[in-house]
């Protein structure tokens, strides 16, 4: 199998998985900030371990 | 000394609150961003990019660009959640850096949006001519193809510029529907591509070799297609119109990116599968077709595929063209207000209320670039500008969190900070530099624009840039009382007092509260806050109105700023959980379907609470005593509400009510009495009487009887669609003919009302 095909498909796969992972992670952060009501940046960093 | 409750109430009565109309939902915001991204980039850039980096190259391009976009989107989302009122790259970068960098970011943002407008105009012309020349009648277009494309691009740009000068724009809802339509269309095309490949795996041979001309070419196409990944910026612009912005704006930005990346990957796959190189390589096949290669490839996938893509490109590009014209004008207008550009740029025409000079200057750029540069150079110019702007956004997010994090209230903070913005900004720097390989002209144009910006800053703007003008304080949230809420949208000062007095009578009867609201329509080309100067007259009007209403009930007066009056009223009723809306009606008809006027009809259709529409009679005065009320009724849902209103109006008076109906030929008196018992029983014996008459024409009989009474209260009729279309609604026909005061009532029935409307039940 063509090595560029393997590398290419891997790059596409990893990039697409990361896009979803970031979106899910970000969504959880929005949800947690909304639930806890914390808005100060230092408090959020501590509470959510960012 | 402590204030008495009455004093507090009186004070509350005398404050006119300005408020912004928050009406864009998460769905609308997401679709706004997705629509802007899909606008044109994918239609023009996909074919050209496959020609440069090959079949697999385009998939890698879209996946990696998606990754960079999601990183930048998180930066943008964090800034928009911390600074939701401001909105837009220029404001965030100005807040972070100020000085020359702040100025240059606005200067570049203006140019980038205008050039993107040129790109969308070219996309429209390219695809329209591609469609036309497939018909023999337009075969002459082949002779001077480039010239015709340029003429059409300039023509469509001029048309939409004119539309913007007239202050007309799409509503949030229709724009989001267009965006949804184009996303779904492209998604279906992508899925068909996958299905075709599964059915006929031999088509996958188009992916060999997977990377046609090396990784460096992929960097070129990543830069070249970046314009298709930047449109989420428009969501930030809508910060002051969004419902729950701290939560919804970051979500919408991220959702828009993920929708667009998935769609792009699917359609790029479909384009490769659809191509039929036959004797040439796939790159040669797409290179030969240029911007319309994408449509040619989809044409081979399924019947009418080419036409579907072409129509989608035409619709998408016009929608995006309109949005970029007013967005670019909005940036230059904001720079004019800041003093960074001449004050004339912040001028607003009195007649149309649009920033005419800012629009004019944006128009010059859009038309010049569309006419003078080839599509590749136009796209590359927009790409470079957006890449540099987002690079600055990624620096800003680090700077603002480090320096101002304690002062701001965040609704979202990105994870893996500061790795994500650093990765994004490095990638954007590399891509922007790499684009020199694609278009040196684009870099020259960008360089000249930046240099001219620096010169303007140091020779003109530096000493003129001022602090932001103080804006009125806009209340974000207010406690909603449990009391019965009546809203009176005030448009016409001539009958406002009269309508207000009716509201006051009902508030007394229901122990309720009143909101007198006037909506200020602010054109799309300027921010809602910047439209506060239009609200002065409305505030005066509400102040005068309040002083005339003699009541002990709580009155809130609100000037609400919205880009659309209809949406402004509807969103306010939802936000304030209004129970009853009272509208005034001048009483003229503009034809079928617009019985109460186009805007009022839209409000009535979309309201989700009870409604009263008052058409004042010829002799009506605000202080007139009501002695006699006529309720024409057939005991339908809406006439029950008419009865409730009548009860409220006669409470504490000696007024009498006549429940009136017209007898049908085959109906007995006993049956009518039985049917109307529910209505008549609402009143005491002395308050109401039933009157039944024989007659052929319901409208004429009611109008004749109405002369003997002070007010007529009608429940909305529920005729079927065709009857309404041919005759107009019975209630509105009566209101139009009657010289007395007529009150139309409509009970909120939720979904059932639609069912009933189509079934066509008679109410009289």
Image: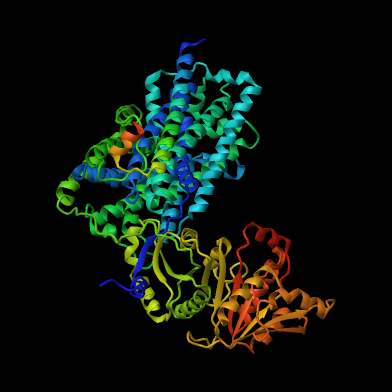
Q: Nearer the viewer, residue B382 or B608?
A: B608
- Count the numbered circles shown: 0
Q: Is residue B370 left or right of residue B700?
A: left
Q: x%, y% of residue B524?
A: 40, 56
Determine which quarter of the picture holds residue B414: top left
Q: Is residue B238 left or right of residue B504?
A: left
Above or below, B325 against B65 in this view is below
Rendering colour mode: rainbow
Q: Nearer the viewer, residue B12 or B125?
A: B12
Q: Nearer the viewer, residue B198 or B420?
A: B420
Q: x%, y% of residue B3?
A: 30, 72
Above or below, B29 against B255 in this view is below
Residue at image coords 69%, 75%: B679
The quadrant of the picture occupied by the N terminus of chain B is bottom left
Residue at image coords 23%, 44%: B102
For residue B118, say whether it is visible: no
Q: Nearer the viewer, residue B476 or B226?
A: B476
Q: x%, y% of residue A29?
A: 40, 36
Above or below, B502 against B27 in this view is below
Q: x%, y% of residue B133?
A: 56, 41
Residue sitting at the far top: A1
The quadrant of the picture occupied by the C terminus of chain B is bottom right
For residue B508, say whether it is visible: yes
Determine which quarter of the picture holds residue B616: bottom right
Residue sitting at the far right: B666
């Amino acid at each position: 199998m063509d090595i560029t095909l393997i590398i290419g498909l891997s790059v596409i796969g990893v990039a697409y998985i990361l896009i979803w992972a970031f979106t899910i992670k970000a969504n959880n952060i929005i949800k947690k900030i909304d639930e806890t009501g914390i808005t100060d940046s230092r408090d959020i960093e501590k509470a959510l371990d960012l | 000394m402590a204030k008495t409750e009455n004093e507090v109430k009186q004070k509350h009565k005398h404050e006119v609150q300005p408020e912004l109309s928050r009406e864009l939902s998460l769905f609308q915001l997401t679709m706004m961003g997705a629509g802007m991204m899909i606008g044109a980039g994918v239609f023009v850039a996909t074919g050209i990019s496959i020609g440069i980096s090959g079949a697999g190259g385009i998939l890698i391009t879209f996946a990696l660009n998606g990754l960079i976009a999601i990183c930048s989107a998180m930066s943008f989302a964090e800034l928009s959640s911390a600074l939701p009122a401001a909105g837009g790259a220029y404001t965030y970068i100005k807040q972070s850096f100020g000085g020359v960098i702040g100025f240059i970011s606005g200067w570049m943002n203006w140019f980038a949006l205008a050039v993107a407008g040129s790109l969308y105009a070219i996309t429209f012309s390219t695809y329209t001519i591609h469609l036309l020349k497939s018909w023999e009648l337009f075969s002459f277009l082949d002779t001077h193809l480039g010239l015709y494309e340029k003429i059409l691009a300039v023509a469509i740009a001029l048309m939409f510029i004119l539309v913007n000068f007239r202050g007309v724009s799409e509503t949030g809802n229709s724009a989001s529907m267009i965006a949804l339509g184009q996303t779904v269309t492209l998604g279906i095309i992508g899925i068909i591509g996958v299905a075709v490949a599964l059915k006929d795996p031999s088509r996958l041979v188009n992916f060999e070799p997977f990377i046609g001309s090396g990784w460096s070419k992929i960097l070129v196409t990543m830069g070249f297609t970046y314009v298709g990944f930047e449109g989420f910026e428009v969501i930030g612009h809508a910060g002051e119109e969004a419902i729950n912005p701290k939560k919804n704006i970051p979500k919408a930005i991220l959702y828009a990116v993920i929708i667009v990346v998935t769609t792009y990957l699917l359609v790029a796959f479909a384009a490769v599968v659809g191509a039929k190189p036959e004797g040439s390589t796939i790159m040669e096949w797409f290179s030969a077709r240029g911007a319309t290669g994408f449509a040619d490839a989809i044409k081979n996938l399924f019947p009418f595929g080419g036409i579907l893509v072409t129509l989608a490109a035409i619709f998408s590009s016009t929608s995006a063209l309109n949005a970029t014209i007013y967005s670019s004008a909005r940036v230059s207008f904001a720079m004019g207000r800041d003093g960074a550009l001449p004050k004339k740029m912040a001028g607003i025409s009195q007649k149309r209320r649009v920033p005419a000079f800012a629009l004019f200057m944006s128009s010059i750029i859009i038309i010049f670039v569309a006419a003078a540069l080839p599509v590749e150079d136009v796209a590359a110019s927009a790409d470079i500008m957006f890449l540099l702007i987002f690079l600055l956004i990624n620096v800003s997010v680090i700077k603002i969190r480090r320096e101002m994090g304690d002062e701001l209230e965040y609704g979202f903070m990105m994870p893996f900070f500061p790795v994500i913005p650093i990765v994004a900004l490095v990638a954007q720097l590399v891509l922007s530099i790499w684009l020199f390989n694609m278009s040196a002209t684009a870099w020259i144009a960008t360089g000249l624009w930046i240099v001219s910006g620096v010169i303007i800053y140091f020779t003109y703007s530096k000493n003129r840039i001022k602090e932001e003008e103080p804006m009125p304080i806009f209340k974000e949230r207010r406690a909603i009382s449990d009391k019965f809420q009546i809203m009176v949208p005030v448009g016409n000062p001539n009958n406002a007092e009269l309508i207000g007095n009716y509201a006051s009578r009902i508030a007394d009867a229901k122990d309720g509260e009143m909101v007198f609201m006037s909506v200020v329509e602010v054109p799309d080309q300027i921010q809602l806050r910047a439209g506060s100067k239009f609200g002065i007259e409305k505030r005066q009007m509400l102040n005068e109105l309040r002083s005339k209403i003699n009541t002990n009930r709580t009155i809130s007066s609100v000037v609400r700023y919205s880009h659309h009056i209809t949406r402004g009223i509807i969103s306010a009723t939802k936000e304030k959980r209004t129970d009853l809306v009272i509208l005034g009606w001048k009483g003229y008809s503009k034809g079928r379907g617009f019985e109460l006027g186009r805007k009022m009809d839209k409000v009535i259709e979309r309201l989700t609470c009870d409604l009263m529409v008052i058409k004042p009679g010829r002799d009506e005065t605000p202080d007139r005593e009501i002695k006699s009320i006529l309720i024409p009724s057939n005991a339908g849902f809406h006439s029950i509400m008419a009865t409730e209103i009548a009860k409220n109006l006669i409470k504490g008076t000696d007024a009498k009510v006549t429940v009136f109906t017209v007898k049908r030929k085959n109906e007995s008196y006993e049956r009518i009495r039985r049917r109307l018992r529910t209505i008549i029983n609402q009143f005491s014996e002395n308050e109401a009487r039933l009157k039944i008459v024989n007659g052929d024409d319901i409208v004429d009989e009611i109008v004749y009887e109405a002369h003997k009474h002070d007010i007529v209260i009608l429940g909305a009729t529920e005729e079927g669609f065709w009857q309404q279309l041919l005759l107009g609604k019975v209630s509105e026909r009566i209101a139009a003919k009657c010289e007395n005061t007529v009150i139309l009532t409509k009970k909120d029935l939720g979904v059932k009302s639609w069912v009933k409307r189509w079934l066509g039940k008679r109410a009289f």
